[in-house]
Amino acid sequence: MEIKVVKHILEANEVIASQNRKLFEEKGIYVANLMGSPGAGKTTLLEKTIEKLKETKSIAVIEGDIETSRDAERIAAHAIPTVQINTGGACHLDGNMVRGGLEGFDLDQIDLLIVENVGNLVCPAEFEIGENDKAMIISVTEGDDKPEKYPLMFQVSSVLLLNKIDLLPYLDFDMERFQGEAFKVNPRLKIMNISCKTGEGLDNWFRWIEERTSKKGS
Amino acid sequence: MHESAIAQSLLEIIEQETLPYAGAKVTTLTLRIGKLSGVMPEALTFAFEALSMGSRSEGASLIIEEVPLSIKCNQCGRVHIVDDPFMICPHCEGTDVEMIAGRELEIRNMEIEDGNQGSQTHT
Ligand SMILES: Nc1nc2c(ncn2[C@@H]2O[C@H](COP(=O)(O)OP(=O)(O)O)[C@@H](O)[C@H]2O)c(=O)[nH]1
Ligand SMILES: [Mg+2]
Ligand SMILES: [Zn+2]
């Protein structure tokens, strides 16, 4: 016999993600889900962001990693609350993993939670975790043809950080092509060119994230 | 790559939906997968076959309908099915465009075979 079930396959995840989102709202926490390939500069950007904002905002970080805890150690060295989530092989974080990770924090003390997702350009885009915004980071060494190849991540992101622009002189990276394609895939995407090495362009990013984070008790 | 997580969720939905039918086996599952979802049908089928072993879905055949990307232009009102993942109206080049199909990750229906009665279909 036939059973009609019209259901979103990831419905269970969406439900947990919206519960997370409600909790973040109640606690007044702004949450950014940072996604990008391995090596794009996610952890480096996080370190820069923490150094810049930690005097004025209470920051916490969730590090999603397939197996190691190296990134979590890098972040913890900046003396902010850090939770490491090992996905045990999964190529993305999901709502449930993040919910588990939250147990490691005192949520009443946090203004800004940044989640470093697992390094991957496909899967994290599909799984909501309860974030306010998805931020994508890609480095110029990955080539200028990525928007059309991995459209979903570009589409679901609010902001795109194009990192390692200090390396542009050594590459054949067609900036016009990249930006044009990214715009076509997502006309609302805010693109920022940055270098975590030289610091170029980072002020734009700091301002963007600072504007979205409200300070507890002020 | 996330096909195994999707197959896992799928199996959980099946278990829930078939609770009232003790002993039934799932024979066919129909899914709708949007072109933009980044899910590869072969990889999903493979993951499903592996993860369904020993469950009531073991051996079920997966019918995957791929849904093309469609966009609706709010400027000229036209709807287009497009090949490229671009949010630009092919007619008026407007960028105030909504995606109306292409991100589906849906289960649509399933065929089950009752433990005692054999296969029967009614709609
Ligand atoms: N030249 C250059 N290297 C960078 C920049 N940002 C990060 N890197 C380097 O890229 C490598 C990967 O960075 P990491 O933050 O670990 O990437 P993740 O895997 O995305 O977390 C490290 O060796 C960083 O020092 C940049 O703006 N310019
Ligand atoms: Mg990292
Ligand atoms: Zn139009």
Image (spheres, coloured by chain):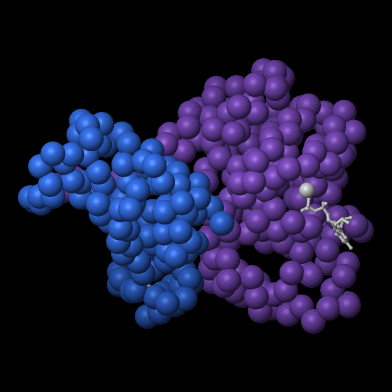
Which residue lies at the image location 85% right of the left edge and 36% below the top edge? A73
Which residue lies at the image location 25% right of the left edge and 31% below the top edge? B19
Q: In this image, B110 relative to A139: left or right? A: left
Would residue A74 be visible to someone looking at this image? Answer: yes
Q: Which chain is blue?
A: B
Q: Which chain is purple?
A: A
Residue B33 against residue B25 in the figure, above or below: below
Would residue A52 be visible to someone looking at this image? Answer: no
Residue A86 x/y as whole percent: 69, 38
* Tally of numbered tags: 0
Which residue lies at the image location 86% right of the left edge and 55% below the top edge? A196
Q: In this view, which residue lies farthest toward the left?
A: B122
Which residue lies at the image location 26% right of the left edge and 47% below the top edge? B26
Residue B94 against residue A78 in the figure, above or below: below
Where residue A166 sits, quadrant-wise, is bottom right
Residue B102 x/y as whole percent: 39, 63
Residue A82 x/y as whole percent: 77, 30
Residue B94 x/y as whole percent: 44, 72
Quadrant that contains the C terminus of chain A = top right
Residue in the foreground of this view, choosing between A25 and A9: A9
Residue B28 against residue B80 in the figure, above or below: above
Residue in the foreground of this view, choosing between A155 and A15: A15
Q: In this image, A109 relative to B46: left or right? A: right
